[in-house]
Image (tube, helix red, strand yellow):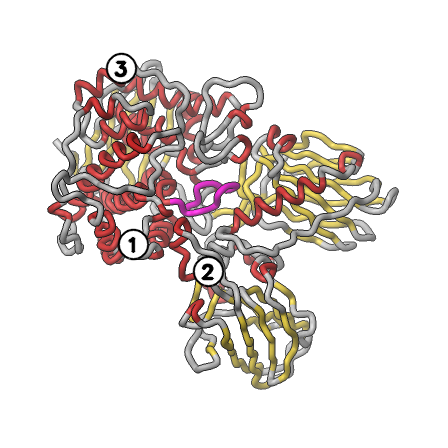
């Protein structure tokens, strides 16, 4: 990995960032001997004049397209002689990347340049060893693959490793053929061999790329919609094509080898469901040319189903080899769960797969949409991380990006509730890891964001006031009910921050001892229209045990509900000893996904519908229909519920120094066993035929 990190370029700029709209980037280098086949590739916000050894090689005008792909500078000399050389980039940037409150954490990434010079056997890439024309060192803006730039076209295939250098690929072997039209297809170990005769061509849409977008996925979805609508006006259905099923949803790229003696044009669609493949206007739609004998690979996207068309001159033969690869950070799983319940194991397995594939440049919310570090999403995804892996680096870098990037006066992701969830995440990270060094490294950020919260605390009522930006759940919610939920979340956050401060007294939280909470009746929460209101009232301590038990015993899962609320429902039930009600909630929501052939956990669910399940899905407030993610990391929470509630292992002291062991047996299930990681080693625990067992590594004690 270290070699990759030294070779993958970074986005760099002047130290004054976007305030410096005209400057130079300079790099001198020495070649001990001449090199051949030199290529210079770059992407940037702005325009650039490229100079080598005092001679202007080429000029790129300012264009949004410069941000989307590495541009090969065709005029760059293919041979470089031995000796010293100086590469000088004269940059002028009139228009930087857009920033709004929702992406304010990216405010330091509004302008950048990324480039690499390759030759045989020489490599040079942009990093903070470059200089600016005024003699300062260049400043790193962000890493390859990070927002707002995302993945770039035109780079070497090993750039898939990303700026952290830890993303890897693995071949997918379970691809199956669903249908083929006008082509002969053979499959072997995931390789798809296509042969046939072409039926002509159609006009291929080229992305205009005239605008800059706040996020990579917003640009891609705009391009897909435009391309798909244009291609719908053509006769693609007459062309040779295949429809493939990867077996599961993956963040997938594929390589395609043209074994034909002439060039081909390819159109491919990617989808999470077959309904989406046939009906969605925003369907993933990509096109590219493939020269005779050429092999290309695509950028990774979140898909399960692929439809691929072959276009060439009427009657001309074609032969292609297609192979898919999974793309993700390979998580070293040390937490395991075993049970004799087929349904419980199915829920665990799809939750595990969902969690694993969402570990990318960050801990993404989803691999198709949005591919971002949303604060509440990775807070919930982290619950599975804690009981599955010893290495939490991907979770940490997501926490750092939002915590450090969000400046004073702003809420994370422009949502007050998300800032509160981030603060809770810091506590839960420390509770499960005991990693005091990481928490203290966030000291300034914790202080800044707690002060942001404190600015809204009413000194008399101790309630949060003037909450303008908020999201509690994807279900419809009136402002008054939303504010009620915020008071419960605020109380939870204050309690957890005080616990954090008690264990790490050197943490700078001068105002936390004065945080109070408003006095509110349980009836206010129990009369809320939405399930989450009642659950937050319970979790926040406003709804007492007797009232909570009465509500939960009588509640049956019904629409509208999401995996978010369903998880908290299971947690509240388990907390009060209503184990079967907890399992019923998990069974209803995740079981519905499984009944619809889910291979990953969904962003949302509709329990009662007819026909097309994907079209029936909605987050009720923001997205409609097929835009709903069918692989969403926040829905992998049943893993944590199984380990902490069903198997019954919960940390009481940070880092599992002291734990509770309170297994909750489920009717009709004979065995539930787990191994989960701690800083002291693996805990082995569970129950089998009504007999509980636990084996603790040295350093961990059981609470009385």
What are the residue bounds of the magenta stretch? 363-374
Q: Which residue is mark 2?
A: 143
Q: Which mark is residue 461?
A: none
| Residue 317 at x, y percent in the picture | 84, 44
The residues bearing labels 3 and 1 have C-alpha atoms spaced at a distance of 43 Å
Asked if the residues shown at circle 3 and circle 1 are in contact, with their CB atoms under 8 angstroms apart, the answer is: no
* Quadrant position of the C terminus in the picture: top left
Q: What percent of the width, then of the height, locates residue 155? A: 60, 60
The residue beneath circle 3 is: 553
Q: Are marks 3 and 2 in contact (CB under 8 Å)?
A: no
When asked about the image quadrant of residue 280, the answer is top right
- C-alpha gap between disc 3 and disc 2: 50 Å
In this view, 292 is above or below 185 = below
Residue highlighted by disc 1? 409
Residue 608 makes an appearance in the image: yes
Assign the magenta stretch its main secondary structure.
loop
Give the Cα separation between the discs numbered 2 and 1.
26 Å
Foreground disc of the pair 3, 1 = 1
**Contact (CB < 8 A) between labels 2 and 1?**
no
Figure quadrant of residue 591:
top left
Residue at 60%, 32% (x, y): give it. Answer: 276
């Amino acid at each position: 990995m270290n070699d990759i990190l030294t070779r993958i370029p970074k986005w760099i700029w002047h130290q004054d960032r976007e305030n410096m709209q005209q400057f130079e980037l300079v790099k001198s280098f020495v070649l001990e001997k001449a090199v051949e086949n030199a290529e210079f590739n770059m992407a940037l916000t702005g325009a650039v004049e490229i100079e080598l050894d005092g001679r202007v090689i080429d000029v790129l005008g300012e264009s949004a397209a410069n941000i989307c792909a590495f541009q090969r500078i065709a005029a760059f000399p293919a041979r470089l002689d031995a000796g010293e050389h100086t590469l000088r980039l004269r940059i002028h940037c009139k228009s930087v990347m857009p920033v709004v409150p929702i992406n304010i954490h990216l405010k330091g990434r509004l302008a950048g340049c990324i480039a690499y010079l390759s030759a045989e056997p020489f490599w040079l890439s942009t990093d903070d060893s470059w200089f600016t024309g005024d003699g300062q060192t260049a400043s790193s803006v962000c890493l390859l693959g990070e927002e707002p730039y995302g993945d770039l076209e035109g780079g070497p295939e090993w750039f898939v490793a990303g700026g952290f250098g830890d993303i890897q690929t693995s071949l997918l072997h379970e691809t199956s053929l669903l249908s083929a039209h006008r082509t002969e297809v053979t499959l072997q170990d995931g390789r798809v061999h296509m042969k046939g005769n072409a039926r002509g061509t159609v006009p291929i849409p080229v992305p205009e790329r005239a605008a800059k977008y706040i996020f990579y996925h917003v640009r891609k979805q705009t391009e897909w919609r435009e391309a798909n609508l244009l291609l719908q006006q053509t006769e693609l259905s007459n062309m040779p094509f295949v429809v493939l099923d990867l077996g599961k949803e993956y963040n997938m790229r594929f390589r395609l080898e043209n074994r034909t003696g002439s060039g081909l044009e390819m159109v491919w669609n990617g989808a999470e469901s077959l309904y989406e493949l046939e009906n969605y206007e925003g369907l993933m739609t990509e096109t590219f040319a493939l020269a005779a004998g050429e092999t290309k690979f695509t950028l990774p996207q979140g898909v399960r189903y692929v439809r691929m068309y072959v276009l060439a001159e009427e009657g001309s033969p074609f032969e292609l080899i297609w192979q898919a690869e999974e793309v993700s950070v390979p998580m070293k799983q040390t937490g395991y769960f075993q049970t004799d319940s087929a349904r419980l194991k199915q829920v665990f397995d799809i939750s595990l797969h969902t969690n694993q594939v969402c570990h990318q440049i960050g801990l993404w919310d989803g691999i198709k949409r949005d591919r971002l570090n949303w604060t509440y999403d990775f807070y919930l995804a982290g619950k599975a991380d804690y009981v599955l892996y010893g290495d939490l680096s991907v979770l940490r870098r997501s926490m750092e990006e939002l915590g450090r990037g969000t400046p004073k006066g702003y809420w994370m992701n422009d949502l007050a509730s998300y800032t509160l969830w981030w603060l809770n995440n810091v506590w839960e990270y420390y509770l499960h890891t005991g990693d005091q060094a990481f928490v203290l490294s966030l000291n300034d950020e914790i202080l800044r964001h707690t002060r942001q919260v404190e600015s809204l605390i009413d000194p008399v009522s101790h309630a949060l006031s003037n909450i303008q930006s908020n999201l509690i759940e994807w279900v419809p919610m009136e402002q008054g009910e939303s504010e009620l939920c915020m008071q419960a979340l605020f109380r939870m956050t204050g309690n957890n921050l005080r616990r954090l401060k008690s264990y790490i007294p050197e943490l700078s939280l001068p105002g936390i001892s004065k945080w109070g909470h408003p006095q509110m009746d349980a009836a206010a929460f129990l009369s809320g229209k939405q399930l989450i209101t009642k659950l937050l009232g319970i979790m926040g301590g406003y709804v007492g045990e007797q009232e909570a038990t009465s509500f939960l015993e009588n509640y049956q899962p019904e629409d509208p509900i999401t995996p978010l609320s369903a998880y908290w429902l299971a947690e509240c039930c388990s907390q009060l000893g209503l184990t079967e009600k907890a399992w019923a909630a998990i069974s209803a929501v995740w079981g519905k996904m499984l009944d619809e052939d889910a291979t990953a956990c969904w962003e949302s669910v509709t329990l009662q519908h007819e026909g097309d399940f994907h079209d029936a899905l909605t987050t009720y407030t923001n997205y409609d229909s097929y835009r709903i993610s069918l692989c969403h990391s926040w829905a992998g929470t049943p893993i944590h519920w199984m380990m902490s509630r069903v198997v019954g292992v919960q940390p009481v002291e940070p880092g599992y120094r002291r734990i509770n062991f309170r297994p909750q047996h489920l009717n009709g299930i004979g065995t539930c066993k787990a191994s989960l990681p701690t800083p002291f080693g693996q805990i082995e625990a569970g129950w089998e035929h009504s007999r509980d067992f636990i084996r603790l590594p040295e350093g961990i004690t059981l609470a009385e």
